[in-house]
Image (spheres, rainbow, N blue to C red):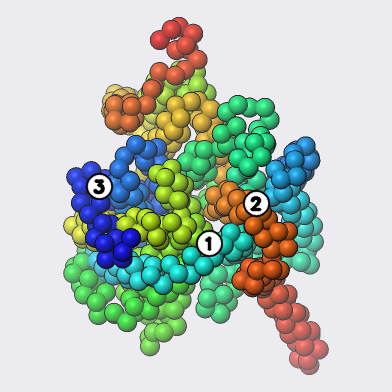
Amino acid sequence: MHLVDAIGAGLYALLTLQAALFMVIGIAYGLVVGILPGLGGIVAMALLLPFTYGYDQAATIALLLGAHIATIWGSSVTSILFRVPGASKSLALIFDGFPLTQRGEASRALGASAMAALLGGLFGAVFLAISIPIVRPLMLALGPSEYLMMALWGLTIIATFSAGSILKGLIAAALGVLTGFVGMDVVTATPRFTFGSLFLMDGISFPVAMIGMFAVAEMMKLYVMGGAIVTREVGVENSSMWTGVRDAFRHWTLVLRSSLLGLWIGVLPGIGASVSGIAAYAQAVQTSKTPERFGKGAIEGVIAPDATLGATEGGALLPTLAFGIPGGEAMAVLLVAFIGLGIVPGPDMLTRHLDVVFSFVWVVVIASTLTTLIGLAIIPYLARLPTLNPNIVIPIVLSVCFVGAYSTHGTMDDVVVAMVFGLIGYLMDRFNFSRANFVIGMVLAVMIERNLHLSLSLYGGDFIFTRPVTLVMFILLIVTTALPFVRKWRRRKAADADAGARQGSPP
Amino acid sequence: MSRRIQENLVLCAILVIFIAAIVACMSYGVRARVVPLPISALGAILTVAQLVLQNLPSVGDFHLDALELFTSRAPGAATAKPASGGEGRAPDAARWRRELMAVGMVLLLTGMFILIGPIPSIFLFSAGYMLAKRQYRWPLSIAFAALFTLVVYVLFAAVLGVQMDNSILGSMFGF
């Protein structure tokens, strides 16, 4: 399909009543869920998965991606107003967003946040659109062995960058890959890890596992936390959101730098949005002429993370759509939904289904714009929001989780699967095993196995050494996996040497 | 029970899973186990390595601070969390109790779904939860639960066309 035709077809697919309605519903829902702490974009999308079957493809993309984009700004709101991050990715917004709220400038902070998110989102969409013609020839030149290496690299780099222990990250990924193998092996027709259960022959349903792993587990966390999620004293508001909007434009170089950072982080598989907010804040501090203002209510401390978070999504969509390697846990959930819709990431996406890719680009543009417009409209009310209570959230979300799991196949077995994955998700979170790694491992398992079988059949057993690009990627995989261990070892050695020198020196 | 013992127990359980997967893989054909077997073996090795490392006081975990990587700032800054109503609020004993109650709550809802079906379960669970937490007075709790159940019914049964009459009691009494 020609590029210009695809751009038009991508937009045309969204110009239906259903698609427009789904996008507005997605954004409104995403904003509400995003504002509730603990219910980030992943929970929002996991709960939407049962609604993605049987509807128009473009409308479903609008629903899911619209909700996801809205949750990003929604979680920024909670960080700014309540000093509790709506999701881990919006942690950086606390540092300066909350001091602004304390000074009575919540409206200004929210206005700057909304506009920076929009500008970042637009950068992300433009990047995605521009990168497609560049990536397309590259993708068509790659074979199954390169895709195999890319999936393995994605998996290891995800574990490397996950919070906490790298070993735990790798263990979680390995568990996820094994879980992805539950069911009938399509190549050999061998039932694997089914324990004689007919239900497990079809494998574990991804949407149900996501619902359990994220939504049910988050509700358990919320229950264990106890009390009101957040409460605050609503002070006198002495700022205007339009000041914040102007601030975002006034710091356009910061917006540009932060958006580029977001794109870069988004493209790297596995690093995702949780790191990008913090990295953006750090670069804003480092490049500021007055870094001492940060932490006390500097508006740049709000603008930078939001612009980065907005741009990350466009960047993260590229590896997700082009290579089938999710940029993070949210992209893994999106990938699951795409597969359910019959969208198979890979070369076909950038050749035969280019219009679908441009639908994604348009959704990012429209959803970012609508989120900001709706956001600006509700800022005066948000700025006076006093409390959020879990006693209403828990029964509602938990019930929707279970009925959502049940509705995927209409069997109670899925409810049990959601419950089991909820318990697993809670334990993983409690003991710092990355749930994102688990889910991404689960999603990549099939890709790894299919490409390994294809590589063995096409190129023989020594394909790693006979295909130069594969060999280079294999070396890259080993280097990037080993690098953190080497860095850690070097730092420890330097610290030991430093301590030794200090002990030896006279007082 | 100390945090380290809990961590060790969790890792032992994971090790058992990997070993069970290795044993299960041995009964599959070569092509069927070509990926799961190495992954299980690798997983088992990594789990043992983590077990050893976390029990050696001289060796820290392989923690990579993302902020440190991107900005060359001091390690640990990225993971610093603000004071919030989050984890760590409840003391250990109270936390255990709440965790058990959270597990019980999830098990209860699952059991109710299987036994009486989704719609009655949602009504009873949400009304019961709000009454137990004294969120609203009982007439308002019941009204809220009824409204929420109605919304779920309309969304899932009417809009999505999901059959909501699946339950053990329902099939016993021929509903």
Number of the front mark, 2 or 3: 2
Q: Nearer the viewer, residue A421 or A74?
A: A421
Left or right of residue A506, residue A165 in this image: left
Q: CA distance from mark 2 to mark 3?
A: 39 Å
Q: Give the residue type that dot 3 points to.
A: Ala
Q: Amino acid at mark 1?
A: Gly
Q: Earlier in the sequence, mark 1 or mark 2?
A: 1
Quadrant housing residue A161: bottom right
Label 2 lies in what chain? A
Near-viewer residue (A384 or B29):
B29
Q: Nearer the viewer, mark 3 or mark 1?
A: 3
Q: Is residue A313 above or below residue A480?
A: above
Q: Secondary structure at mark 1?
A: loop
Q: Which mark is residue A453?
A: 2
| Rendering coords of residue B122 (x, y %) | 40, 26
Label 3 resides on the chain identified as: A
Say the numbered circle drawn on residue A19.
Answer: 3
Which amino acid lies under the numbered mark 2 shown in the image of this protein?
His
Q: Residue at x 54, y 30 (%)?
A: A416
Q: Residue at x 45, y 6 (%)?
A: B173
Report in which chain the residue with disc 1 lies.
A
Residue at point 42% right, 30% down? A407
Question: Do callouts 1 and 2 point to residues on the same chain?
Answer: yes
> Disc 1 marks which residue?
A270
